[in-house]
Every structure is written in C-alpha cells, then in structure tokens.
Image (spheres, grey):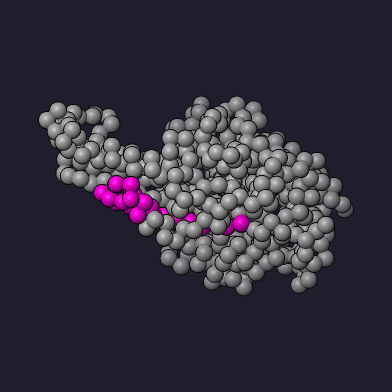
Amino acid sequence: MTRADAIARAREDFRSGAFLAELDRRVAFKTESQNPSRGPELRAYLEQEMQPAFAALDFTSRIVESPSGKAPFLLAEHLESASAPTVLIYGHGDVVDGMEGEWRDGRDPWRTTVAGTRLYGRGTADNKGQHSINMAALRAVRDARGGKLGFNAKFIVEMGEEIGSPDLGKVCDLNRDALKADLFMASDGPRLSADRPTLFLGCRGGIRIHLDVNLRDGGHHSGNWGGVLANPATILVNAISTLVDGHGRLQLDALKPPRLSNQIRSYLADVQVVPSADEPALAENWGEEGLSAAERLYAWNTLEVLAMSSGNIEKPANAIPGHANAVLQLRFVVGTKIEGLIEAIRAHLVAKGFPMVEVRAAQSFAASRTDFDSPWIKWAADSVQETTGKAPAVLPNFGGSLPNDVFSETLGLPTIWVPHSYPGCSQHAPNEHILLPLTEEALTVMAGLFWDLGQLRAPLTSPLT
C-alpha cells in the first residue's frame, strides 16, 4: 500500500457516508460543559463513544478523573516501536449551549443536517468534527498499512475546554510520562479561509480587564445636577480612550507586544485576510498603523471592549448614573510582558487624571507558540502541500486562544494545529456547521500527515532543508 492508498481510503470514508454517520452519532451526545446537569453526558461521550472507537483502532485507553471533581478525561495510546516518532493528539468533546429553538429552519442542534455544502450540528466545527476527522485519518492509514500506523500515537480528550480547561494543565502534569511524545499535532479553530489549508504554531493569550467607576449610590436628576456632578459613564469612556483610541490603536506601551521580527513578517507576507460573503467585512482604517490585516490579527495585540454598562439602556432615566462598568480584553502574542500590566494600567489612568477608575483582572490565559526553526514545521507544510497542491498558510498563532501552553510549556512539545473549520462556521452560535468539501479535504490532509509520520525512521531533531 502507498500514501495514495491511505488518502483514497480517507476520501472513501467520507464519500460512502460512513464518516458523516459517525459524526452524527457523536453530535447526538448533549455534552454542554457549561450546563451543570450534563455531567452524565460528558462521561458517556468518553465511555460509550470514544473508548470503543479507540479500541477499534487498537488503542488502549483509560478514564482519568479530574483532580477537582469536574468532567473526566480520556487518555488513549497505541505503541509500535521505541524508535518511531510519537505524536500526541488532542480533542475536546464538550460543546457550548445547544441553543435549541434558535437554529435556522428549526434544525435540531443535536442531529447533523446537510444543507447544500454545509453540515449543521452543535460540535460539528468545535470540536467533535475536528477530532473525528483525525481519528478517521488514523484509521485510513492503519488500514492502508495492514493494521500498523508506522508511528506511536497518543490521544487526550477533555470535556471542559468550553469552560476554560480548568484541569487540563494539572492532568497533563500528573500524567507527564504517559503523555511523553515528540510532536503535538491537533485540530481546533478555523483555517485562514475555507480554501487554504493552515498550520498554526500556537495561540495568543488573553486577559480580561475590568474597569469600574463607582461615584455614588443611585442616580440624580440630570437637570438639577447636570454640570456639577461628575458622570461615571463620561469618565469611563474617556479613560478607555487613553488605552485604545477610536481606530482600535493601542495608546499605552505596556499593552503592546515587541516589535514584529522580519521572520514573522516573512511568514505572513503572503497571507491575505479575505472574508467570505457571509462573514463581516474588514473595517477600513482600523487597527495598528503600518501593519497588514494578517499582522494585526496574528502577530499583534488588540484591546477590545467586550461590554459596557451604565444606567438602564432599555428605560433610560433623566438622571446622572452613579456607576459605570466595562469589561475589556487584551489578546496578546508571545513576548508581551503581562506581569505588572494591571499596575501599569492603573498608574497610567492616574497620570491621565482618572484615579477614580478601579482596575482589576480576571480570566487570563497564556500565549505560546512553537519556535519557527522547528523541523516539524517544514515537514508538516511539505506534507500538506503534497496532498492538496496548495501551499498552506503557516501562522505564528491563532487569533483566538486555546490551551496550547499546556502542551508547549508543561509538556515541552513542538505544537502544530491543523484546523478543519473556517471563519464563518458559526461556532458558539446557532447554526454551527462545517463545510463538506473542506471536511473531505481535511480527511486527506490528515491521512497524508499521518502516513508521512510513519515514513520517518526517527523523530525530527534538526531543520529540514
């Protein structure tokens, strides 16, 4: 059997309907991790669906309980040779709220539905569809090699990604030896675009910044007190404008990343951010000056206002409010100095005349990425190009965030993410879907990658030329 045979098997798995039937069965598990009543469903997905699927691939697996009593994890492994490369793969089986009743044409979020080139269902894009593609590709390679992969494979499935992966770091640290590998390769999030395969090397970090102005209890008549009472909403919006201006440009150096390197610029030079017809158009004159859209999205920091509140917007009273609150989020790349950031913001606001603005942080996650010099990057890019005939976009990190630091920092692995969704997939919203042509291509991409991994006699340790 050959590489072409493995890819043909992956394609036939899709065209026969077998893969789609498998995904429909997995979508039917109502694994909403944000819903406390779904604990039995979260466990059932691992015990009733994942464990039999891994057993069919000749993996051994075990359930690992959460250290804090939350949803369990599944660890699976298939070992063939001590000298062969070992890959660690990740997926999460939990999903966000199903949002029943809000889907177009009355679709049931817990069943897959085909409409044109789209396959709808909760978890199709995030993340059941994506880890199912990777498992199906493993099956195609195993069948093509007569029951062998040609490499060692390990898989971790968690059920708490949508609540921030609270125990993933602890579980990986406690099972460090069991998860030892040469490469981390997994799938989540969207490609750069539907028609261009993409490799992400890590993810941006994030930190929520709460700004509160609490001047007095209750509101006071705007006619009787306007002009003599400070307005907390006016103070707050002006304070925010000293952090990020009306064009989305950072105003405080402490919020900015290091200068973009020539290496990062070269990787992003041919990357075009072009929304499809059903995605929002890019704003003109928005974001850091002198950067391309790709550099702003994948190599720079952004400060976004997520929510603001003052008074009652539904029934505004003719009164000066006593309080104003905002939640901002800084998305940041590797190299940003986060330690001391809140203190720097607080000192900045005091210097700008806003000592009454209270500053605090919540919900932070780290930025991380694989070194560009890792030999695995060129290996993966070459494999994807051989399969698809397209040069993949190699991006330093996701625009969003994933628990990549657990694998890159805690486990010390080179990390490569191969996403199988696209930006308009409506993940975390009604009408979540994957694209059928993209799914078929993704199956072949992963079959090619896994076949090529089995061709290596030993792990890569030096740059490919």
Please give the range of residues in magenta.
345-369
Magenta stretch holds residue 346: yes
In this orientation, which residue lies closer to the viewer: 59 or 310?
310
Q: Number of callouts in the render?
A: 0
Give the percent coordinates (x, y) of residue 133: 67, 47
In this orientation, which residue lies closer to the viewer: 162 or 304?
304
Q: Is residue 341 above or below residue 243?
A: below
In this orientation, which residue lies closer to the viewer: 217 or 254?
254
Is 364 left or right of 59, judged from the image as shown?
left
Q: Identify the image quadrant of the C terminus.
A: bottom right
Give the percent coordinates (x, y) of residue 35: 41, 49
Q: Residue at x 24, y 36 (%)?
A: 311
Magenta stretch holds residue 169: no
Q: Residue furthest right?
A: 1
- Residue 258 seen from this side: yes
Q: Residue at x 14, y 28 (%)?
A: 223
**Rendered image quadrant of residue 198:** top right
**Rendered image quadrant of residue 83:** bottom right
Q: Residue furthest left?
A: 224
Give the percent coordinates (x, y) of residue 337: 49, 58
Is 299 left or right of 67, judged from the image as shown?
right
Is 368 left or right of 247, judged from the image as shown?
right
- Residue 13 seen from this side: no
Give the percent coordinates (x, y) of residue 313: 28, 31
Q: Residue at x 72, y 55 (%)?
A: 377
Q: Is residue 449 above or below residue 168?
A: above
Q: Residue at x 64, y 42 (%)?
A: 191
